[in-house]
Amino acid sequence: MFENRKYREKNWLEKLKQSWSVLKDSQKIFIGIAILNGLCFICWRIPRFHPFMCRNFLTNVSTNSIPLLPMILSNFSHHSLTHLVMNMIVLYSFCDLAVRLFGRENFLALYLSSGVISSLSGCLYKVISNISSPSLGASGAILGILGATCLEKPDISLMIVFFPFFTFSSYTALKSILLFDALGLILRWHFFDHAAHIGGTLSGVYYSHHFKEYLNKNKFLITKYWNDFKNKFQF
């Protein structure tokens, strides 16, 4: 009986590994990000985890300092199911194209760096405006991916999820997003963290306009430094 159960478990794991191995890089990346976001959402539902989540998965300017770790982890944190689902839908829509355009490693680097820049932008605006509300969510990181992708492919046709009959170009979408968030800052709307959104979007714009070219020109040197770093720390 025990051996039979052990065999079934091994067979199940083998099937899981086989299914994972045939997935595209973009699918693996999306699933990984979605799982992390889902786990964080579940943790928010468990009261005993609240102190830990508030300490590490929120960017909060009401404290004496703004640690770096929450600026990273807050990009995987959602308190609302609607917020989580909408962000994952947008990420899924752009993930495959973005990974094909930038490559797996550059996609992840852009996603994380856009998230950190987004968090920092939101914090700076709140300090200047004397606003103390905390922030969380993957919107800034996703907007970084969206901004870079829309500049690389400005003519692709997009649509709003619930209005498939209404289409527009990706470049129009990018301009509209920046305009909307700029208006949000000027008119002091507080439903979204508009400063964080602008920071994330502009980090993607900067990557597409300048940083991608720098990486392409120096990829051999960067690869050498990266390999030396991995060999030094043996990972």
Image (cartoon, grey):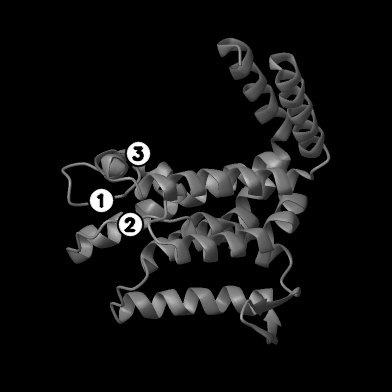
> Where's residue 66, x and y in %?
26, 43
Q: Secondary structure at mark 3?
A: helix
Q: With 43 as the anchor, is 114 left or right in this view?
A: right
Q: Secondary structure at mark 2?
A: loop
Q: Which residue is mark 2?
A: 135
> In percent of the image, x 82 and y 33: which residue is there?
18
The numbered mark at residue 68 is: 3
Q: Earlier in the sequence, mark 2 or mark 1?
A: 1
Marks 1 and 3, how far apart at CA: 11 Å
Q: Residue furthest front?
A: 1
Marks 3 and 2, how far apart at CA: 14 Å
In the displayed structure, 43 sits above or below 200; it is above
Front position in the image: 113 or 95 = 95
Q: Which residue is mark 1?
A: 60
**Number of the front mark, 1 or 3:** 1
> Where's residue 122, x and y in %?
34, 59
Q: Amino acid at mark 2?
A: Ser
In the displayed structure, 113 sits above or below 124; it is above
